[in-house]
Amino acid sequence: MTITFGQIAGLIAALAFLILVVFICTVLKHLVTTVKEMNNGIQILTKDANSIAGNVDELLVKTNVLMEDVNHKVSELDPLFKTAAELSESVSDLNVASRSMADKVVRSTESAAKTSAALRVGKMALGFYQRHKQKQSK
């Protein structure tokens, strides 16, 4: 049996095709494994995302309840702050009034002191005048 060059070429081509098919099968097997792992990962991520979304929804509900409670408590504190502001204004008005009264008392005292001094000077002058008259009448 003689093998021709065409038969050898055909045999080489058949071998190359066989190697190519084996290589492609191996690649496809790895590709299928990779795709399965990706599907599993996507399923796990989907479950985790759903769980996180549920937790976020619960957190939002609790946050809204908390914000309503805080807003209610703040609205209850508003009158207290208004009252404190009014009290501060009243104290300020009282300070202004007491300073004004103190200024009036000081001015009144100064005026009384001047009047008292003028009376003393007048009394002394009257005393000198009376003594001078008594000396002249003697």
Image (cartoon, rainbow, N blue to C red):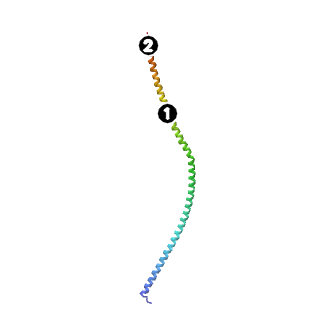
Disc number for residue 100: 1
Residue depicted at 45% across the width and 20% down the height:
122
Label 1 is placed on what type of residue?
Ser
Residue 104 pos. (x, y %): 49, 31
Residue 90 pos. (x, y %): 53, 38
Q: Quadrant of the N terminus?
A: bottom left
- The residue mark sitting in front, 2 or 1, is 2
Q: Is residue 46 above or below residue 83?
A: below
Label pair 2/1, CB-CB below 8 angstroms: no
SS at mark 2 in the image: helix
Other-residue count near label 1 (Cα within 10 Å), few / some / many at <14 / 14–19 / ≥20: few
Report the residue marked by disc 2.
Answer: 133
Residue depicted at 48% across the width and 78% down the height:
22
Disc number for residue 113: none
Residue depicted at 54% across the width and 65% down the height:
46
Nearer to me, 71 or 89: 89
Other-residue count near label 2 (Cα within 10 Å), few / some / many at <14 / 14–19 / ≥20: few
